[in-house]
């Protein structure tokens, strides 16, 4: 059984870094993480 890294799976299913699809995916993930961090910070205030 072969194991794949997270990066290999993203390359295979989304596209390699630098492609339009991968850049959009990475931007969406970053935006979701920022949103979740802001939401968490607001609940602690």
Image (tube, grey):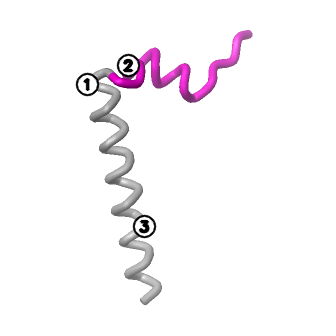
Q: Position of residue 4 (x, y in %)?
A: 63, 19
Residue corresponding to mark 1: 20
What element does badge 2 sit on? loop
Q: Are marks 1 and 2 in contact (CB under 8 Å)?
A: yes
Magenta-colored stretch includes residue 2: yes
Q: Quadrant of residue 14?
A: top left
Which quadrant: the C terminus?
bottom left
Q: Are marks 2 and 3 in contact (CB under 8 Å)?
A: no
Which quadrant: the N terminus?
top right
Query: Bounds of the magenta span?
Result: 1-18
Q: Position of residue 20 (x, y in %)?
A: 26, 24
Residue corresponding to mark 2: 15
Q: Residue furthest right?
A: 1
Tell me what residue is drawn at x 62 percent, y 25 percent.
Answer: 5
- Give the Cα distance between marks 1 and 3: 26 Å
Among numbered discs 1 and 3, the one appearing first in the sequence = 1
Q: Position of residue 22 (x, y in %)?
A: 34, 27
What element does badge 1 sit on? helix
- Give the Cα distance between marks 1 and 2: 8 Å
């Amino acid at each position: 059984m072969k194991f794949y890294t997270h990066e290999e799976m993203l390359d295979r299913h989304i596209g390699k870094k630098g492609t339009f699809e991968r850049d959009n995916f990475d931007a969406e993930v970053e935006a979701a993480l920022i949103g979740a961090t802001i939401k968490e910070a607001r609940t602690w205030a």
